[in-house]
Amino acid sequence: MSKRKRPSSTTLALASLILLGSATAAWFALGPQRSAEAEGERAAALAAIARSDRDEARARLDRWLALEPRSGEAKALSAQVDIETGDLARVSDQLNEARALGFPEPGLERVHALVLARMGRFGEAEPILARELNEHPDDAAVLEALALVYLKTYRLRDAEKLIARWMRAQPDAARPYVWRAEIDRRIQVDTSIDLETDYREALRRDPGLEAARLGLAELLRRAHRGAEAAAEYEIYLKARPDDPTALAGAGQNAVDLGRIDEGLKLADAALAVDPQNVTALRARAAAELSRGDPESALKRLDRCLKINPFDSEALYTRSLVRARLGQADEARADLETVERLKREQAELLAIRDKLMAAPDDNGLRAQVAAWMLAHGRADEAVEWARTILASNPKHRAANRIMAEYYDTQPDGSGLANYHRLQAADADADADAGAEQR
Protein backbone atom coordinates (compact mmCIF):
# COMPACT_ATOMS: atom_id res chain seq x y z
CA MET A 1 0.00 0.00 0.00
CA SER A 2 1.22 3.53 -0.68
CA LYS A 3 2.01 5.74 2.32
CA ARG A 4 -0.52 8.37 3.29
CA LYS A 5 -0.64 11.14 5.84
CA ARG A 6 -1.89 10.26 9.30
CA PRO A 7 -5.57 11.31 9.40
CA SER A 8 -6.54 14.05 11.80
CA SER A 9 -8.92 13.50 14.69
CA THR A 10 -11.54 15.46 12.73
CA THR A 11 -11.11 13.11 9.77
CA LEU A 12 -11.54 10.11 12.05
CA ALA A 13 -14.68 11.56 13.59
CA LEU A 14 -16.11 12.19 10.13
CA ALA A 15 -15.18 8.68 9.06
CA SER A 16 -17.04 7.31 12.07
CA LEU A 17 -20.14 9.32 11.21
CA ILE A 18 -20.02 8.34 7.54
CA LEU A 19 -19.41 4.67 8.24
CA LEU A 20 -21.98 4.22 10.94
CA GLY A 21 -24.55 7.01 10.85
CA SER A 22 -25.28 9.88 13.22
CA ALA A 23 -27.65 7.92 15.48
CA THR A 24 -25.03 5.21 15.87
CA ALA A 25 -22.31 7.77 16.59
CA ALA A 26 -24.49 9.20 19.36
CA TRP A 27 -24.78 5.72 20.87
CA PHE A 28 -20.98 5.44 20.93
CA ALA A 29 -20.68 8.79 22.71
CA LEU A 30 -23.06 7.63 25.45
CA GLY A 31 -21.56 4.13 25.67
CA PRO A 32 -18.96 2.77 28.11
CA GLN A 33 -15.54 4.39 28.27
CA ARG A 34 -12.76 2.40 26.58
CA SER A 35 -9.09 2.22 27.41
CA ALA A 36 -6.59 4.44 25.64
CA GLU A 37 -5.17 1.37 23.89
CA ALA A 38 -8.60 0.25 22.65
CA GLU A 39 -9.40 3.80 21.53
CA GLY A 40 -6.14 3.87 19.59
CA GLU A 41 -6.99 0.61 17.80
CA ARG A 42 -10.51 1.90 17.06
CA ALA A 43 -9.14 5.13 15.57
CA ALA A 44 -6.59 3.21 13.50
CA ALA A 45 -9.28 0.79 12.26
CA LEU A 46 -11.58 3.64 11.22
CA ALA A 47 -8.71 5.37 9.42
CA ALA A 48 -7.80 2.17 7.58
CA ILE A 49 -11.41 1.60 6.53
CA ALA A 50 -11.73 5.21 5.36
CA ARG A 51 -8.68 4.84 3.09
CA SER A 52 -9.74 1.32 1.95
CA ASP A 53 -6.72 -0.43 3.50
CA ARG A 54 -8.52 -3.66 4.30
CA ASP A 55 -5.53 -5.64 5.57
CA GLU A 56 -4.65 -2.93 8.08
CA ALA A 57 -8.33 -2.57 9.03
CA ARG A 58 -8.62 -6.29 9.71
CA ALA A 59 -5.45 -6.32 11.84
CA ARG A 60 -6.60 -3.30 13.87
CA LEU A 61 -10.10 -4.70 14.36
CA ASP A 62 -8.69 -8.01 15.57
CA ARG A 63 -6.54 -6.19 18.13
CA TRP A 64 -9.48 -4.02 19.17
CA LEU A 65 -11.69 -7.09 19.67
CA ALA A 66 -8.94 -8.76 21.70
CA LEU A 67 -9.09 -5.76 24.03
CA GLU A 68 -12.89 -5.35 23.90
CA PRO A 69 -14.47 -8.67 22.87
CA ARG A 70 -17.96 -7.31 23.61
CA SER A 71 -17.72 -4.24 21.39
CA GLY A 72 -20.76 -4.15 19.12
CA GLU A 73 -19.14 -1.40 17.07
CA ALA A 74 -16.03 -3.50 16.40
CA LYS A 75 -18.13 -6.49 15.39
CA ALA A 76 -20.22 -4.38 13.00
CA LEU A 77 -17.09 -2.91 11.43
CA SER A 78 -15.57 -6.40 11.17
CA ALA A 79 -18.65 -7.48 9.25
CA GLN A 80 -18.19 -4.53 6.87
CA VAL A 81 -14.53 -5.39 6.21
CA ASP A 82 -15.42 -9.05 5.60
CA ILE A 83 -18.07 -7.95 3.11
CA GLU A 84 -15.59 -5.75 1.26
CA THR A 85 -13.07 -8.60 1.03
CA GLY A 86 -15.74 -11.04 -0.15
CA ASP A 87 -15.57 -13.19 3.00
CA LEU A 88 -19.27 -13.53 3.82
CA ALA A 89 -19.05 -16.67 5.99
CA ARG A 90 -18.85 -14.81 9.33
CA VAL A 91 -20.94 -11.76 8.50
CA SER A 92 -24.30 -13.06 9.71
CA ASP A 93 -22.88 -14.14 13.08
CA GLN A 94 -21.07 -10.82 13.50
CA LEU A 95 -24.22 -8.82 12.80
CA ASN A 96 -26.25 -10.94 15.21
CA GLU A 97 -23.60 -10.49 17.91
CA ALA A 98 -23.49 -6.74 17.31
CA ARG A 99 -27.28 -6.60 17.62
CA ALA A 100 -27.22 -8.63 20.84
CA LEU A 101 -24.64 -6.19 22.25
CA GLY A 102 -26.98 -3.27 21.61
CA PHE A 103 -25.51 -1.91 18.40
CA PRO A 104 -28.07 0.51 16.85
CA GLU A 105 -30.31 -0.97 14.16
CA PRO A 106 -29.68 1.76 11.52
CA GLY A 107 -25.99 0.87 11.41
CA LEU A 108 -26.81 -2.84 11.12
CA GLU A 109 -29.29 -2.20 8.32
CA ARG A 110 -26.58 -0.39 6.38
CA VAL A 111 -24.16 -3.32 6.74
CA HIS A 112 -26.95 -5.77 5.84
CA ALA A 113 -27.56 -3.81 2.62
CA LEU A 114 -23.86 -4.16 1.77
CA VAL A 115 -24.27 -7.93 2.21
CA LEU A 116 -27.37 -8.01 0.01
CA ALA A 117 -25.51 -6.20 -2.77
CA ARG A 118 -22.62 -8.70 -2.61
CA MET A 119 -25.08 -11.60 -2.67
CA GLY A 120 -26.72 -10.31 -5.84
CA ARG A 121 -29.99 -9.36 -4.15
CA PHE A 122 -29.92 -5.97 -5.80
CA GLY A 123 -33.60 -5.11 -5.58
CA GLU A 124 -33.54 -5.48 -1.79
CA ALA A 125 -30.22 -3.68 -1.36
CA GLU A 126 -30.86 -0.66 -3.58
CA PRO A 127 -33.48 1.30 -1.57
CA ILE A 128 -31.47 0.98 1.65
CA LEU A 129 -28.23 1.98 -0.06
CA ALA A 130 -29.89 4.93 -1.82
CA ARG A 131 -31.25 6.19 1.51
CA GLU A 132 -27.87 5.77 3.19
CA LEU A 133 -26.15 7.66 0.39
CA ASN A 134 -28.66 10.48 0.63
CA GLU A 135 -27.82 10.85 4.34
CA HIS A 136 -24.05 10.31 3.94
CA PRO A 137 -23.02 11.34 0.39
CA ASP A 138 -19.32 10.44 0.81
CA ASP A 139 -19.74 6.95 2.29
CA ALA A 140 -17.29 4.99 0.12
CA ALA A 141 -18.63 1.55 1.09
CA VAL A 142 -22.17 2.54 0.10
CA LEU A 143 -20.95 4.23 -3.09
CA GLU A 144 -19.16 1.03 -4.06
CA ALA A 145 -22.11 -1.23 -3.23
CA LEU A 146 -24.60 0.94 -5.12
CA ALA A 147 -22.19 1.12 -8.07
CA LEU A 148 -22.16 -2.70 -8.03
CA VAL A 149 -25.97 -2.74 -8.15
CA TYR A 150 -26.00 -0.36 -11.11
CA LEU A 151 -23.24 -2.25 -12.94
CA LYS A 152 -24.94 -5.61 -12.56
CA THR A 153 -28.26 -4.22 -13.81
CA TYR A 154 -26.69 -2.35 -16.75
CA ARG A 155 -27.42 1.12 -15.39
CA LEU A 156 -23.93 1.94 -16.51
CA ARG A 157 -24.35 5.71 -16.76
CA ASP A 158 -25.68 5.83 -13.19
CA ALA A 159 -22.73 3.70 -12.09
CA GLU A 160 -20.36 6.04 -13.90
CA LYS A 161 -21.76 9.04 -12.01
CA LEU A 162 -21.40 7.26 -8.66
CA ILE A 163 -17.81 6.28 -9.39
CA ALA A 164 -16.95 9.86 -10.38
CA ARG A 165 -18.50 11.00 -7.09
CA TRP A 166 -16.44 8.39 -5.23
CA MET A 167 -13.27 9.66 -6.92
CA ARG A 168 -14.07 13.20 -5.78
CA ALA A 169 -14.76 12.04 -2.23
CA GLN A 170 -11.58 9.92 -2.07
CA PRO A 171 -9.05 11.18 -4.65
CA ASP A 172 -6.37 8.82 -3.28
CA ALA A 173 -8.59 5.73 -3.46
CA ALA A 174 -7.57 3.07 -5.97
CA ARG A 175 -10.69 0.92 -6.26
CA PRO A 176 -12.85 3.47 -8.14
CA TYR A 177 -10.50 3.09 -11.10
CA VAL A 178 -11.04 -0.68 -11.16
CA TRP A 179 -14.78 -0.09 -11.17
CA ARG A 180 -14.48 2.41 -14.02
CA ALA A 181 -12.52 -0.19 -15.97
CA GLU A 182 -15.36 -2.64 -15.36
CA ILE A 183 -17.82 -0.20 -16.94
CA ASP A 184 -15.65 0.04 -20.05
CA ARG A 185 -15.35 -3.75 -20.15
CA ARG A 186 -19.12 -4.17 -19.95
CA ILE A 187 -19.73 -1.65 -22.71
CA GLN A 188 -17.49 -3.93 -24.81
CA VAL A 189 -16.19 -1.33 -27.21
CA ASP A 190 -12.54 -0.85 -28.13
CA THR A 191 -11.47 0.76 -24.88
CA SER A 192 -8.21 -1.09 -24.22
CA ILE A 193 -6.34 2.21 -23.79
CA ASP A 194 -8.91 3.44 -21.25
CA LEU A 195 -8.80 0.10 -19.43
CA GLU A 196 -5.03 0.14 -19.21
CA THR A 197 -5.05 3.75 -17.98
CA ASP A 198 -7.53 2.93 -15.22
CA TYR A 199 -5.66 -0.16 -14.06
CA ARG A 200 -2.38 1.75 -13.97
CA GLU A 201 -3.99 4.68 -12.10
CA ALA A 202 -5.31 2.21 -9.53
CA LEU A 203 -1.89 0.61 -9.12
CA ARG A 204 -0.21 4.00 -8.82
CA ARG A 205 -2.43 4.67 -5.82
CA ASP A 206 -2.20 1.16 -4.39
CA PRO A 207 0.44 -1.21 -5.86
CA GLY A 208 -1.05 -4.03 -3.79
CA LEU A 209 -4.55 -3.83 -5.30
CA GLU A 210 -4.87 -7.34 -6.66
CA ALA A 211 -7.91 -6.78 -8.87
CA ALA A 212 -6.06 -4.04 -10.76
CA ARG A 213 -2.85 -6.09 -11.08
CA LEU A 214 -4.65 -9.16 -12.43
CA GLY A 215 -6.90 -7.06 -14.66
CA LEU A 216 -3.85 -5.39 -16.20
CA ALA A 217 -2.08 -8.72 -16.71
CA GLU A 218 -5.11 -10.23 -18.46
CA LEU A 219 -5.57 -7.12 -20.61
CA LEU A 220 -1.94 -7.17 -21.73
CA ARG A 221 -2.12 -10.89 -22.52
CA ARG A 222 -5.18 -10.44 -24.71
CA ALA A 223 -3.45 -7.50 -26.45
CA HIS A 224 -0.53 -9.86 -27.29
CA ARG A 225 1.87 -7.83 -25.14
CA GLY A 226 3.21 -10.99 -23.62
CA ALA A 227 6.43 -9.74 -22.01
CA GLU A 228 4.57 -6.96 -20.17
CA ALA A 229 1.81 -9.38 -19.17
CA ALA A 230 4.36 -11.86 -17.80
CA ALA A 231 5.82 -9.17 -15.53
CA GLU A 232 2.38 -8.33 -14.11
CA TYR A 233 1.47 -11.99 -13.59
CA GLU A 234 4.77 -12.52 -11.76
CA ILE A 235 4.05 -9.68 -9.33
CA TYR A 236 0.50 -10.91 -8.75
CA LEU A 237 1.50 -14.55 -8.22
CA LYS A 238 4.04 -13.58 -5.57
CA ALA A 239 1.09 -12.41 -3.47
CA ARG A 240 -1.41 -15.05 -4.66
CA PRO A 241 0.60 -18.13 -5.73
CA ASP A 242 -2.43 -20.46 -5.71
CA ASP A 243 -4.87 -18.29 -7.71
CA PRO A 244 -6.02 -20.56 -10.57
CA THR A 245 -7.15 -17.66 -12.75
CA ALA A 246 -3.72 -16.03 -12.61
CA LEU A 247 -1.87 -19.34 -12.98
CA ALA A 248 -3.95 -20.24 -16.03
CA GLY A 249 -3.55 -16.80 -17.62
CA ALA A 250 0.18 -16.82 -16.98
CA GLY A 251 0.37 -20.32 -18.44
CA GLN A 252 -1.47 -19.31 -21.61
CA ASN A 253 0.75 -16.24 -21.88
CA ALA A 254 3.92 -18.34 -21.55
CA VAL A 255 2.72 -20.73 -24.28
CA ASP A 256 1.94 -17.76 -26.53
CA LEU A 257 5.52 -16.56 -25.97
CA GLY A 258 6.86 -19.99 -26.95
CA ARG A 259 7.92 -20.86 -23.39
CA ILE A 260 6.18 -24.22 -23.53
CA ASP A 261 7.66 -25.92 -20.45
CA GLU A 262 6.88 -22.89 -18.29
CA GLY A 263 3.35 -22.71 -19.71
CA LEU A 264 2.69 -26.38 -18.97
CA LYS A 265 3.96 -26.00 -15.42
CA LEU A 266 1.70 -23.01 -14.77
CA ALA A 267 -1.34 -24.61 -16.44
CA ASP A 268 -0.88 -27.80 -14.42
CA ALA A 269 -0.59 -25.73 -11.23
CA ALA A 270 -3.91 -24.05 -12.10
CA LEU A 271 -5.57 -27.41 -12.79
CA ALA A 272 -4.30 -28.79 -9.48
CA VAL A 273 -6.29 -26.05 -7.73
CA ASP A 274 -9.22 -25.95 -10.18
CA PRO A 275 -9.51 -29.05 -12.40
CA GLN A 276 -12.24 -27.36 -14.46
CA ASN A 277 -10.33 -24.20 -15.33
CA VAL A 278 -10.98 -23.83 -19.06
CA THR A 279 -8.18 -21.31 -19.64
CA ALA A 280 -5.66 -23.79 -18.22
CA LEU A 281 -7.09 -26.58 -20.36
CA ARG A 282 -6.83 -24.39 -23.45
CA ALA A 283 -3.23 -23.50 -22.54
CA ARG A 284 -2.37 -27.18 -22.21
CA ALA A 285 -4.02 -27.96 -25.54
CA ALA A 286 -2.02 -25.16 -27.22
CA ALA A 287 1.20 -26.52 -25.70
CA GLU A 288 0.41 -30.04 -26.91
CA LEU A 289 -0.30 -28.72 -30.39
CA SER A 290 3.02 -26.90 -30.45
CA ARG A 291 4.71 -30.19 -29.55
CA GLY A 292 3.04 -31.97 -32.46
CA ASP A 293 0.48 -33.92 -30.42
CA PRO A 294 -2.95 -32.98 -31.85
CA GLU A 295 -4.61 -36.10 -30.43
CA SER A 296 -3.84 -35.06 -26.83
CA ALA A 297 -4.83 -31.48 -27.65
CA LEU A 298 -8.19 -32.71 -28.96
CA LYS A 299 -8.87 -34.65 -25.75
CA ARG A 300 -8.04 -31.56 -23.73
CA LEU A 301 -10.38 -29.37 -25.81
CA ASP A 302 -13.16 -31.95 -25.61
CA ARG A 303 -12.88 -31.78 -21.82
CA CYS A 304 -12.88 -27.99 -21.93
CA LEU A 305 -16.08 -27.92 -23.99
CA LYS A 306 -17.76 -30.47 -21.76
CA ILE A 307 -17.24 -27.99 -18.91
CA ASN A 308 -18.29 -24.96 -20.97
CA PRO A 309 -20.04 -25.73 -24.29
CA PHE A 310 -20.16 -22.00 -25.06
CA ASP A 311 -16.38 -21.41 -25.11
CA SER A 312 -15.94 -19.96 -28.61
CA GLU A 313 -12.15 -19.91 -28.36
CA ALA A 314 -12.00 -23.62 -27.51
CA LEU A 315 -14.49 -24.43 -30.27
CA TYR A 316 -12.47 -22.55 -32.87
CA THR A 317 -9.21 -24.20 -31.78
CA ARG A 318 -10.88 -27.61 -31.83
CA SER A 319 -12.07 -26.98 -35.39
CA LEU A 320 -8.43 -26.40 -36.42
CA VAL A 321 -7.28 -29.55 -34.62
CA ARG A 322 -10.03 -31.63 -36.20
CA ALA A 323 -9.17 -30.30 -39.65
CA ARG A 324 -5.53 -31.21 -39.01
CA LEU A 325 -6.60 -34.75 -38.05
CA GLY A 326 -8.72 -35.10 -41.20
CA GLN A 327 -12.07 -34.78 -39.39
CA ALA A 328 -13.54 -32.35 -41.91
CA ASP A 329 -17.22 -32.74 -40.99
CA GLU A 330 -16.56 -32.31 -37.27
CA ALA A 331 -14.35 -29.28 -37.94
CA ARG A 332 -17.10 -27.70 -40.04
CA ALA A 333 -19.67 -28.34 -37.28
CA ASP A 334 -17.45 -26.58 -34.73
CA LEU A 335 -17.08 -23.55 -37.00
CA GLU A 336 -20.84 -23.41 -37.51
CA THR A 337 -21.30 -23.43 -33.73
CA VAL A 338 -18.79 -20.60 -33.39
CA GLU A 339 -20.77 -18.53 -35.90
CA ARG A 340 -24.04 -19.30 -34.10
CA LEU A 341 -22.56 -18.20 -30.78
CA LYS A 342 -21.39 -14.97 -32.40
CA ARG A 343 -24.94 -14.27 -33.56
CA GLU A 344 -26.34 -15.06 -30.12
CA GLN A 345 -23.74 -12.80 -28.49
CA ALA A 346 -24.83 -10.04 -30.87
CA GLU A 347 -28.42 -10.57 -29.69
CA LEU A 348 -27.32 -10.05 -26.09
CA LEU A 349 -25.43 -6.88 -27.04
CA ALA A 350 -28.56 -5.55 -28.77
CA ILE A 351 -30.60 -6.14 -25.60
CA ARG A 352 -27.82 -4.49 -23.59
CA ASP A 353 -28.00 -1.38 -25.77
CA LYS A 354 -31.76 -1.18 -25.18
CA LEU A 355 -31.23 -1.63 -21.44
CA MET A 356 -28.80 1.26 -21.31
CA ALA A 357 -31.62 3.46 -22.63
CA ALA A 358 -34.32 1.86 -20.42
CA PRO A 359 -32.51 0.31 -17.42
CA ASP A 360 -35.67 -0.35 -15.38
CA ASP A 361 -37.48 -2.29 -18.13
CA ASN A 362 -38.29 -5.68 -16.57
CA GLY A 363 -39.10 -7.17 -19.96
CA LEU A 364 -35.57 -6.46 -21.18
CA ARG A 365 -34.12 -7.66 -17.89
CA ALA A 366 -36.03 -10.94 -18.31
CA GLN A 367 -34.59 -11.35 -21.81
CA VAL A 368 -31.08 -10.99 -20.39
CA ALA A 369 -31.85 -13.49 -17.61
CA ALA A 370 -33.21 -16.01 -20.10
CA TRP A 371 -30.13 -15.57 -22.33
CA MET A 372 -27.79 -16.10 -19.37
CA LEU A 373 -29.60 -19.25 -18.27
CA ALA A 374 -29.58 -20.66 -21.81
CA HIS A 375 -25.83 -20.03 -22.12
CA GLY A 376 -24.64 -21.68 -18.93
CA ARG A 377 -24.40 -18.52 -16.82
CA ALA A 378 -26.97 -19.50 -14.22
CA ASP A 379 -25.65 -17.32 -11.39
CA GLU A 380 -26.01 -14.20 -13.52
CA ALA A 381 -29.48 -15.31 -14.65
CA VAL A 382 -30.56 -15.61 -11.02
CA GLU A 383 -29.20 -12.13 -10.21
CA TRP A 384 -31.26 -10.63 -13.04
CA ALA A 385 -34.40 -12.59 -12.12
CA ARG A 386 -34.16 -11.58 -8.46
CA THR A 387 -33.80 -7.94 -9.43
CA ILE A 388 -37.04 -8.22 -11.43
CA LEU A 389 -38.87 -10.03 -8.63
CA ALA A 390 -37.87 -7.40 -6.07
CA SER A 391 -40.05 -4.91 -7.96
CA ASN A 392 -42.65 -7.38 -9.29
CA PRO A 393 -42.87 -10.65 -7.30
CA LYS A 394 -45.33 -12.15 -9.81
CA HIS A 395 -43.38 -11.41 -12.97
CA ARG A 396 -44.10 -14.43 -15.17
CA ALA A 397 -40.85 -14.72 -17.07
CA ALA A 398 -38.68 -14.12 -14.01
CA ASN A 399 -40.54 -16.75 -11.98
CA ARG A 400 -40.24 -19.27 -14.81
CA ILE A 401 -36.50 -18.64 -15.00
CA MET A 402 -36.18 -19.16 -11.24
CA ALA A 403 -38.24 -22.37 -11.46
CA GLU A 404 -36.03 -23.69 -14.26
CA TYR A 405 -32.93 -22.81 -12.25
CA TYR A 406 -34.13 -24.50 -9.06
CA ASP A 407 -35.10 -27.62 -11.02
CA THR A 408 -31.35 -28.14 -11.55
CA GLN A 409 -30.38 -27.60 -7.90
CA PRO A 410 -30.15 -30.24 -5.15
CA ASP A 411 -33.19 -29.94 -2.89
CA GLY A 412 -34.51 -27.18 -5.13
CA SER A 413 -37.89 -28.74 -5.95
CA GLY A 414 -39.76 -26.76 -3.29
CA LEU A 415 -38.53 -23.40 -4.55
CA ALA A 416 -39.07 -24.50 -8.16
CA ASN A 417 -42.72 -25.28 -7.36
CA TYR A 418 -43.11 -21.97 -5.52
CA HIS A 419 -41.92 -19.99 -8.55
CA ARG A 420 -44.11 -22.04 -10.89
CA LEU A 421 -47.11 -21.16 -8.72
CA GLN A 422 -46.15 -17.48 -8.84
CA ALA A 423 -45.93 -17.65 -12.63
CA ALA A 424 -49.30 -19.41 -12.77
CA ASP A 425 -50.85 -16.69 -10.59
CA ALA A 426 -49.48 -14.10 -13.00
CA ASP A 427 -51.04 -16.00 -15.91
CA ALA A 428 -54.38 -16.12 -14.08
CA ASP A 429 -54.23 -12.39 -13.33
CA ALA A 430 -53.47 -11.69 -16.99
CA ASP A 431 -56.41 -13.86 -18.14
CA ALA A 432 -58.75 -12.11 -15.69
CA GLY A 433 -57.64 -8.74 -16.97
CA ALA A 434 -58.24 -9.82 -20.56
CA GLU A 435 -61.79 -10.97 -19.71
CA GLN A 436 -62.57 -7.65 -18.05
CA ARG A 437 -61.41 -5.79 -21.15
Image (cartoon, rainbow, N blue to C red):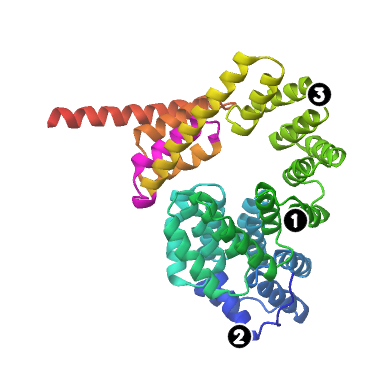
Between 20 and 406, the residue placed more toward the observer is 406
Query: Is 358 included in the stretch rendered in magenta?
Result: yes
Three-letter residue code for mark 2: Thr
State whether residue 239 is above or below residue 366: below
Span colored in magenta: 356-378
State whether residue 217 is above or below residue 252: below
Between 316 and 128, the residue placed more toward the observer is 316
Three-letter residue code for mark 1: Glu
Between 279 and 22, the residue placed more toward the observer is 279
Q: Secondary structure at mark 1?
A: helix
The tag on residue 10 is: 2
- Residue 102 seen by the camera: no
Name the N-terminal-most of marks 3 and 1: 1
Q: Residue at x 65, y 26 (%)?
A: 305
Residue that badge 3 annotates:
293
Name the N-terminal-most of marks 3 and 2: 2
- Callout 3: 10 Å neighbours few (<14), some, many (20+)? some
Q: Secondary structure at mark 3?
A: loop
Q: Are marks 3 and 1 in contact (CB under 8 Å)?
A: no
Q: CA distance from mark 3 to mark 2?
A: 67 Å
- Residue 100 seen by the camera: yes
Question: Would residue 274 appear left or right of 12 to someone viewing this image?
Answer: right
Relative image position of residue 278 (x, y in whole percent): 69, 34
The tag on residue 228 is: 1
State whether residue 370 is above or below residue 116: above
Q: CA distance from mark 3 to mark 1?
A: 29 Å
The tag on residue 332 is: none
Relative image position of residue 21 (x, y in whole percent): 52, 71
Q: Residue at x 44, y 71 (%)?
A: 135
